[in-house]
Structure formats: C-alpha cells, structure tokens
Image (cartoon, rainbow, N blue to C red):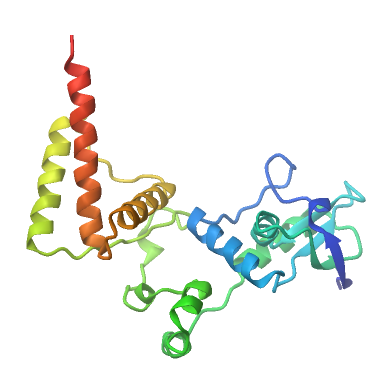
Amino acid sequence: MLKTHVERRALREVSLLSAASGHENARFMPKRQFNRLVENIRRDGVLTSAPLIGQSVDEPGRWYVLSGNHRVEAALAAGLTEADCIVITEPLTTQQFVALQLSHNAIEGEDDPAILRKLYDLLDLDLKEYSGVTDDQFDLDQLNVKTLPSATLRYLEVVFAFLGDEADAILEFVKRAERYAKHQQPVLVTQYADFDLLIDSLTAVKEYRNIKNSAVGLRVLCELAMKQITVERAADERP
C-alpha cells in the first residue's frame, strides 16, 4: 500500500519526466491544448489538480512528477512557483515508478454526450473556452481505431464548409499549388503539429483581416500563400 500526504512544494525543485532526465513521459499534449492549460492556470492563480510526485530507490532525494507533468510545466509557464503536491513518502522501484506513470495516463473515464452537452450549454462563451470543450465535439463521429495499424497514432478530422465561390477558389489554389510543386508525390500523412501551424496561421489571418468565417479565412490564407509562391518562383527563374 502506498503512503502519501499532501505537501506544498517548489515546482522547480521537482523533475519532469523526459528523455534527458532518464525517465521518459509517454503522454504528450498538442501545443494549442498546452497553451489553453497555461491560460487557465494563469486565470485561476493556482493548480486545481495536485501533481503526484515520488522518488526512485536508485535516485534517493530526487523527486519526479509521476502524474501531472504538463500541469507542472504549464504552471511554471503561467508564473506559479509552488503548488500542493501528493507526495509518495517511500522510494519506488523502477517497475513501480513506471507502472504508476502509465496507470495515471491510461485509466480515464468517458463523458456521457447528453450530460456533457447539457453542462456545456450552461456556460457563457468565456467559460466554454476555459472548459476546453468545443461545439465540434458534439458533431463528430467516433473514429474506429481498431482498423488502424497502430493505436498509438493520433488522427484528427477537420471539416470546412465552403460556399460556391470559396470552394472554387480553394480548388483552383490546389491545382496551382500542384503545378508549382517540385515533387508530385501525394502526402498521405503529416505531423500532428502541422495542424497547429495551420490553425495558428488561419487565426492570424482572420484577426489581421477582421474575418469571422473560417472558410473565408482559409481562402484568404491560400491567396496569400499563392502570392508568396509567385514571388519565390519569379526569384528562382531569374538568371
């Protein structure tokens, strides 16, 4: 049986799981989700969920975050210097160390869609953003990952609805981009982080041009990309 107690700890005095520390973290968090976590913690001024920390028998005196690495990292980014932590008092074996980490990452509950929607509808716009839940979650079908080659791969389906003119413009952009491409090999899979780059670019264009509709914003983003391609192509063709 594990013995624990809650203790206030300086966050920079506990080590995060990383390859550099010799204890890797299997859980990762997309950049946009991490940024939202930072903003939530900055708004709250405290960690509302206590990290779990412990030490290995091989490294007595060095404390690691076994659960809550992203919370601690986000808390530091938000300016917090200390927080209440759940402290495992006795040193852990290597197997206990890893098993605790994996169990906290793997064992999760699931939301009842009807109840989740009911609770979500109680929030104003500001708190809806704070919650991390979006309207899109109530419309997307569950992806069946059993037929995928590896359950560790993460997939995200993004759907944009275009009016006639915008749809024609996007299709024309794709055709022109294909003509300018040096390699005509189709791209079937790309990095998950590229989605963050797309959304960040789209957000910047919408804010700069005061555009509210994402489909229109994507069209403007494509137009800007084509202008840049034209400039670079002209530069390449100069003697």
| Left-right relation of 61 to 104 | right
Location of residue 91 (image quadrant): bottom right
137 shown above or below 194: below
**Which of the pair 176/91 is nearer the observer?**
176
Going 70% across and 57% down the picture, which residue do you hit? 79
Up-down: is 81 above or below 7? Answer: above
Query: Is residue 94 among the parts visible in the rendering?
Result: yes
- Front residue of 199 and 69: 199
Q: Quadrant of the C terminus?
A: top left
Snapshot quadrant of residue 28: bottom right
State the residue at coordinates (53%, 63%).
36
Taking the image as drawn, is residue 182 in sight?
no
Residue, x 28% and y 45% (percent of image)?
A: 188
| Image x and y of residue 2, in percent | 86, 71
List x then y, in percent, for residue 60: 92, 50
Left or right, residue 104 beside residue 235: right
Return the x and y of residue 197 as percentages of the image width and height: 39, 48
